[in-house]
Amino acid sequence: MEQHMNAVKQAIEMQKAGFDNMLNSTLMFLNQSDLMLNSFLGFATWMPEEMKNAFRQQWEANKQAFAFFKKSVDDGFDNLKKLLEEGKLPKFGNQ
């Protein structure tokens, strides 16, 4: 049973590492997009200030949603690790 538990823990750690790498790549993309948006809005003298503010507000909402998503998934992985450490594995099939 201990070998199965170690295999499950390793699989979860691998999934978390893959997820973290995907999030870091996405975060780099978002940061670069943020710089490009701010640069564009700075040079868009033809655009009304209200529209620029709407773009900035939407961008901030997107960043907050991304941070909330990351925190939610991290909390889920932490809870899963905690359940495994307590030995509370879910039962599947005819076990």
Image (tube, rainbow, N blue to C red):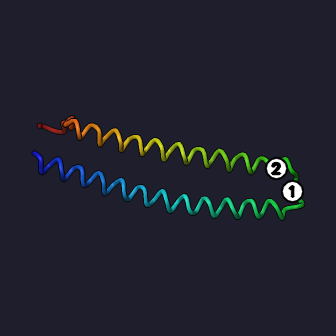
The numbered disc on residue 51 is 2
How many numbered marks, from 0 up? 2
Label 1, on which residue? 47
Q: What crowding class fits label 1: few (fewer than 14 Cα within 10 Å), some (14-19), or many (20 or more)?
A: few
Residue in the image at 11% along x and 37% along y: 95
Few, some or many residues within 10 Å of mark 2 (<14, 14–19, 20+): few
Q: Which amino acid does label 2 sit on?
A: Met
Whether residue 90 is visible: no
Q: Picture coordinates of residue 69 (x, y %)?
A: 50, 45
Question: Dots 2 and 1: beta carbons under 8 Å?
Answer: yes
Tell me the quarter of the picture where residue 87 sits: top left
- Mark 2–mark 1 distance (CA, rounded to whole Å): 7 Å
The answer to whether residue 55 is visible is yes
In the figure, is residue 2 to the left or right of 16? left
Tell me if 6 is positioned left or right of 28 in this view: left
Three-letter residue code for mark 1: Met
Q: Which residue is drawn at 46% across and 41% down?
A: 72
Find residue 31 and report its horizontal and vertical position in percent: 62, 60
